[in-house]
Image (cartoon, coloured by chain):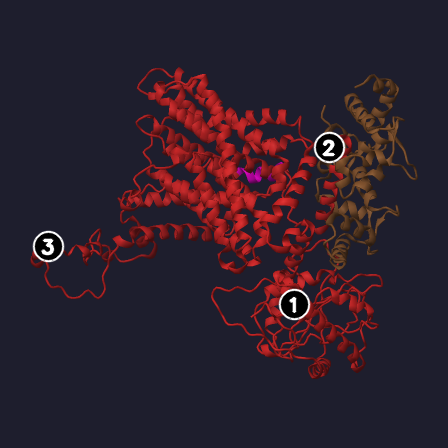
Chain colours: A brown, B red
Amino acid sequence: MGSRASTLLREEEIEEIKKETGFSHSQITRLYSRFTSLDKGENGTLSREDFQRIPELAINPLGDRIINAFFPEGEDQVNFRGFMRTLAHFRPIEDSEKNKNTSTSEPLNSRTNKLLFAFRLYDLDRDDKISRDELLQVLRMMVGVNISDEQLGSIADRTIQEADTNGDSSISFNEFIKVLEKVDVEQKMSIRFLH
Amino acid sequence: MSPRRGFRHPGSFGSSLPERGLLLLVLIVLLQGSLLPFGAASSPDVGHRDEADVHAEAEEKHNFTKKPFPVLSFEYKHIQVPFEISLWVLLASLMKLGFHLIPRLPGIVPESCLLILVGLLVGGLIKLAGQKVPPVLDSNLFFFCLLPPIILDAGYFLPIRPFMENLGTILMFAVVGTLWNAFFIGGLLYAVCQIQPNNPSDLHSLELLPCLLFGSIISAVDPVAVLAVFEEIHINELLHILVFGESLLNDAVTVVLYHLFEEYSGVGSVTVIDGVLGVISFFVVALGGVLVGAIYGILAAFTSRFTSHTRVIEPLFVFVYSYMAYLSAEMFHLSGIMALIACGAVMRPYVEANISHKSHTTIKYFLKMWSSVSETLIFIFLGVATVDGQHNWNWTFVTVTVVLCLVARVIGVVGLTYVINKFRIVKLTTKDQFIVAYGGLRGAIAFSLGFLLDKRHFPLRNMFLTAIIIVIFFTVFVQGMTIKPLVDLLAVKKKQEAKRSINEEIHTQFLDHLLTGIEDICGHYGHHHWKDKLNRFNKKYVKKCLIAGERSKEPQLIAFYHKLEMKHAIELVESGGGAKLSSAIPSTVSMQNIQPKKPAPAKPEDRVLPKLSKSREEEIRKILRSNLQKTRQRLRSYNRHTLLADPYEDNFGEFLLKKQKMMALDKKIQDMNNYLTVPAAPPDSPTLCRARLASDPQAYSMKPALDSVPTIQVDLASPQSPDSVNILDEFQRSEQAAAAEEGEDDGGLMMKAPTRPHERCNAGEMDAGTREKLSRCLSDPGPHAEDEDEDEPFLP
């Protein structure tokens, strides 16, 4: 870590981030150095272009959506707090946290919040429903260009039909949760931030 | 592995088996004793017939008295070997049948226990009859015939995803755990033996190295036993893959340890150099085995790319390549089990994309059949060999061994889990650890390895064998029988029976991409990053080589979807099949209740079919018959070697042809709407798709009053048995969209979702893909095949 990094990140900030996201001290500093290495403009915030410079993200079918998820509504820059807040969703759930009862608001990396994050990536217009079109868009991104629209449409139809319990031809958040109840989301949506 | 090869004279199998097999036959079928001329054949042996030499003629003239021509003769020797093999296999299979007929037994006692008991019984019977018990658990037989099918079955159907996700844990258990077990047991046994007083009991003379050798033999968890027991308890996937994966991967460790100690126990000491060489050897054995398996797997995948014209031998390639992988690995003293697993796992995704559906089913059932028979035979032979073996019972040795095995296992698992949990996202709980420890069963591999020991180098071989057998019995009987109640008692999570839905598949892939992206943002080259790279490499280069034709570009999601649809369609046909076939006559009721067999929890609809009045049917049928074209049915000559062509692989041109025909037909249907006296159905959504049955695809369905219920209307009113399904391709739908009236519909097999205003019909399921697949399944042409409307180019 360069001296530049340590002067820009104060202890109080680290404490606040720790409380908010649950990351440990070393994880926060490590991620801060990553943040600064991405921040080519050196202004303490990241823009979309900074993200797009990451080569692997360009070939990721969901790349754009992931980048957008970092930026709050309507803004073009994200600071370190926001960066960490988004990444906090992917922290592994620890056993100690599992046992805590939800007297306080749920931590950012609870199962529900993880699923909510994923749900928001589908649901671009934020109407709390994944409509057929939104699903089609995602399918098209994942599947590539060789598959016909009709085929994709039938897959989308089938998907919605399987998940839809209240008959509104779209997948609400609760239906989304229900469909994924057998999938081990805690493991799937966690990244081991090794020291 | 050298011990497994060249063991005994190859002829031993045949010549040392006496008429015991015949005796067994007597016991089973209660033949008369007079049919048993032991060893004596009343007619000249076939083999000796050639020896009627010229110069022996003189003697022959003296010996050869004229006997009446034998009308019926009995000669056992020349069919003895195959006969006895078949008899054993038959016995095994009958036993398996029998167990499941007894009402409550399979729930209480695992099959493996029962089979061992049967083996004991049979062995006992043979001994009672005074015959010599054949050395059935001959190591050659075991390692070359009985073990490979089981391992191949396991490897081919290995769930790759959970295996790879838990690979670190599995390897820790397999390698470190087995090493710990071996050294702990061997070392403590030696200590116990040393403290034995130097009395006539030969324990004191047991050296350290033979002890360690024994420890390494007994320490390995056995895949056969684990499979046999865990199959029945339906435990959750994670635990299953942990214990099972461990049992597979510890083969490499066992091989190296066994060799090492066997080689050097003659010499009496192991130096550090040997130890280092042993470690290197371990890597060579393990990685070499995997490499050999992977090479054969790729060869098999490549071969399957070209089998589109000779579908019948496709399964053969899978089996032969895998077996050769096993043998090749054994040839180099590498781990044959790991080669087999690697071969199966590598070839599977590519082979399955290339082969036909029928070959896929064949492979699946053959593997299951062989592995099932093998497993049964292994347990029976264990029982027989127990009766036969020359035992050297030593209380101390045996009890100490059993106790040490348990203790070592528990300590090993607990210790390793403590370390592993630091690196796992989903930690292993105490319950999990208990099951993993308790599931460490020993089995026939340990016995066979012990059997191979040379008596000259290991004077206490019989004692070892006795102890091994007791440990096996203990683990299989005690642990095997109690694990099920314990699983229930501890409320361990069970396997979820429901199949993977398309939702799960889509979302899982979605999450994969998401996580890969996040990892890239963090700059963290983790699990997802490498998996993504591998997938990309696979898609870009490997699939192009190994998968034939268009399938190579098919994304995984689409392939999954097609498979799902096909399964669904097959189930549909099967559940409705009984009813369908019985009504080839027009006057029968055309609507049947079709209940899908699977509980289908996710599906909101029920399928209930209302009845269609016969007079209406007749009317419609008349109209249709007079108006529809009839195309010539292409007849095919029957050839044993041809299979139904795979419709998925037919060229696109045929599709276009059918599409045009369909369009023409549909125009006609729309015109005919006017002739209907029945109320037209409420307009369906434009994406209505349907499968049409061959004969009168345009039988009009009566929209029942039950609009709230999705209906499957199987119109069997056609004169021909509607067994072939017309392909309606998806372009059809856009035509429908343009149609003003969607009223009619077709008959035959149609699925509708409840016709709520915005509802998409669940005929989304029956799209082109399904229909193609449906046609693949239905193979009988109707009685009036030439009247069929549509070409069925892929059905004879």
Give the CA distance from mark 3 to mark 1: 74 Å
Q: Secondary structure at mark 3?
A: loop
On screen, residue B191 above or below B174:
above
Mark 3 vs 1, N-terminal side: 3
Q: Quadrant of the N terminus of chain B?
A: top left
Task: Say which residue label 3 marks.
Answer: B56
Q: Position of residue B382 (x, y in %)?
A: 40, 40
* Residue B751, position as x, y percentages in the image: 72, 65
Distance from label 1 to label 2 (Cα)?
49 Å
Amino acid type at image mark 1? Glu
| Quadrant of the image occupied by residue B391 | top left
Q: Which residue is mark 2?
A: A191
Magenta residues, start to end: B482-490
Give residue B187's position: percent from left, percent from top.
45, 20
Q: Is residue B269 left or right of residue B577?
A: left
Say which residue label 1 marks. B654
Type of the residue with mark 2: Ile
Q: Quadrant of residue A1?
A: top right
